[in-house]
Image: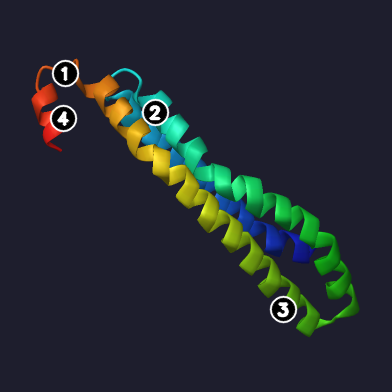
Amino acid sequence: AVKIFKLLVPRVIGTAVAQFNLFVITIFASALSAGSIAVYSFASNLAALPVDLFGLSYAVAAFPSLGEDAARGDLKKIIADVSRAMGRVLFFIIHSTILFLLPLKMWFWRMVRFLYCDSPEFSTKELYAI
C-alpha cells in the first residue's frame, strides 16, 4: 500500500497542476471579449485530440503486454515494447497534428475576425495587414 501511494503522488501533482492551469486560463479568458472561453475550450480540445485519439488508445492496448513482461521481470522486452509503441504513437501523432494544422490557419483567422472585428481599437484594415 505504501508503494501505491508513492507512485500516486506524481500523478496527483500533475493532475492538480493541469487543473490549476485550466482555472487560471479561464479567469484570464473571462476578462477578455465574449466568446474567449469558448475559443480556449475549442483550442484545448483540438490540441488534445491527436494525443487522446492515438496515444491513449495505443497505451490502453499496450499495457496488458507490458504488465505481463513486468510480472516476468523481462526488462529487455519491456524496453523494446515501449520503444516500439512510442515510435508508432509518435508517427500517428505527428502526422495527425500536421493534418489538423493545415486547416487551422483558416479557422484561426475566422476566430480572430469573430472576436476582434467588433472592437473599436482593432480595425479590419489591421486584420488583413497581419
Label 2 with label 3: CB-CB less than 8 Å: no
Q: Residue at x 75, y 73 (%)?
A: 81
Residue 114, by quadrant, is top left
Residue topped by disc 2: 39
Q: CA distance from mark 1 to mark 4?
A: 12 Å
| Mark closest to the chain's N terminus, 2 or 3 | 2
- Left or right relative to 32: residue 73: right
Q: Quadrant of residue 127?
A: top left
Q: x and y percent of residue 110 in the render?
A: 31, 26
Classify residue 32 by image quadrant: top left
The kind of residue on which mark 2 rests is Val
* N-terminal-most mark, 1 or 2: 2
Residue displayed at 16% across by 18% down: 119
Q: Which residue is mark 4?
A: 127
| Pointer 1 or 4: first along the chain | 1
Q: Position of residue 13 (x, y in %)?
A: 56, 53
Q: Earlier in the sequence, mark 3 or mark 1?
A: 3
Q: Secondary structure at mark 4?
A: helix
Residue, disc 3 = 79
Query: Where in the figure is residue 35, as x and y percent of width and height?
Result: 35, 20
Residue at 46% over, 31% down? 42
Label 4 to label 2: alpha-carbon separation: 18 Å
Q: Identity of the amino acid at label 3?
A: Ile
Earlier in the chain: of badge 4 and badge 2, it is: 2
Direction from residue 54 to residue 68 in the image, left or right: right
CA–CA distance between discs 2 and 3? 40 Å
Q: Are marks 1 and 4 in contact (CB under 8 Å)?
A: no
Q: Kindly report the distance in space between the C-alpha atoms of the residues bearing marks 4 and 3.
A: 51 Å
Q: Quadrant of the C terminus?
A: top left
Q: Is residue 53 above or below residue 23?
A: below
Tell me the residue that label 1 is attached to.
Answer: 119
